[in-house]
Image (spheres, rainbow, N blue to C red):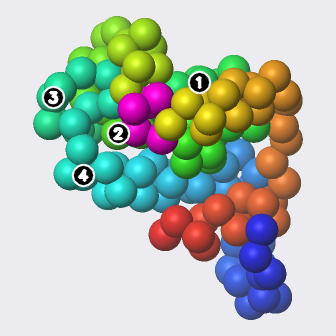
Amino acid sequence: MSELSAEVIQKYKKYSIPQLKKKAQVFFNAWIRKRDQSEQCISCDSYKLHSASHFYSAGHYNSLRFNEDNVHASCHRCNYFLSGNLIEYRKKLIKRIGEKRVVTLDLLADHKFCKHDSFTLISIIEKYK
């Protein structure tokens, strides 16, 4: 986490933790979609990328919510209607980031609980905006 200036912290003083988390998620997801804009859907071969899809769901694995290896652009169909299409997601995730990083992600998933504080969330917002 990078150093935050008092000025930056003051800028976000009016936001609650849930508001900061939502704001951080918006910036992070937009960054993921931009990063993967020239890629195909992580789960299928579609180029209609509308979603930032979490391999380990953000709701159940809060510690991986903002992990760049855990989130990739996907089509709306795979992310929402096929719940991530996780079997295909995993196959393509291994091709995209390598088996070693996927195994690391699996190990990190063992530590589901993570409570983000305001400073962490502000750092995420500032990094990805």
Check disc 1 and report the residue beneath it. Answer: 57
CA gap, disc 4 and disc 3: 12 Å
Instruction: Give coordinates of residue 59: x percent, y percent.
Output: 65, 25
Check disc 2 and report the residue beneath it. Answer: 73
CA gap, disc 2 and disc 4: 8 Å
Question: Residue at horizontal 43%, vertical 10%?
Answer: 87
| Vertical relation: 70 (above or below) 35 | above
Residue 128 belongs to the span the image colors magenta: no
Mark 1, residues whose alpha carbon is within 10 Å: few (<14), some, or many (≥20)?
Answer: some
Question: Looking at the image, is mark 4 or mark 1 nearer the viewer?
Answer: 4
Instruction: Give coordinates of residue 104: x percent, y percent.
Output: 70, 34
Question: Looking at the image, is mark 1 or mark 3 nearer the viewer?
Answer: 3
Check disc 4 and report the residue beneath it. Answer: 37
Disc on the earlier residue, 2 or 3: 3
Q: Which region is colored magenta?
A: 93-97
Question: Residue at horizontal 20%, vertical 51%?
Answer: 38
Mark 2, residues whose alpha carbon is within 10 Å: few (<14), some, or many (≥20)?
Answer: many
From this viewpoint, is residue 22 visible?
no
Check disc 3 and report the residue beneath it. Answer: 46
| Vertical relation: 50 (above or below) 4 | above
Instruction: Give coordinates of residue 62: x percent, y percent.
Output: 72, 33
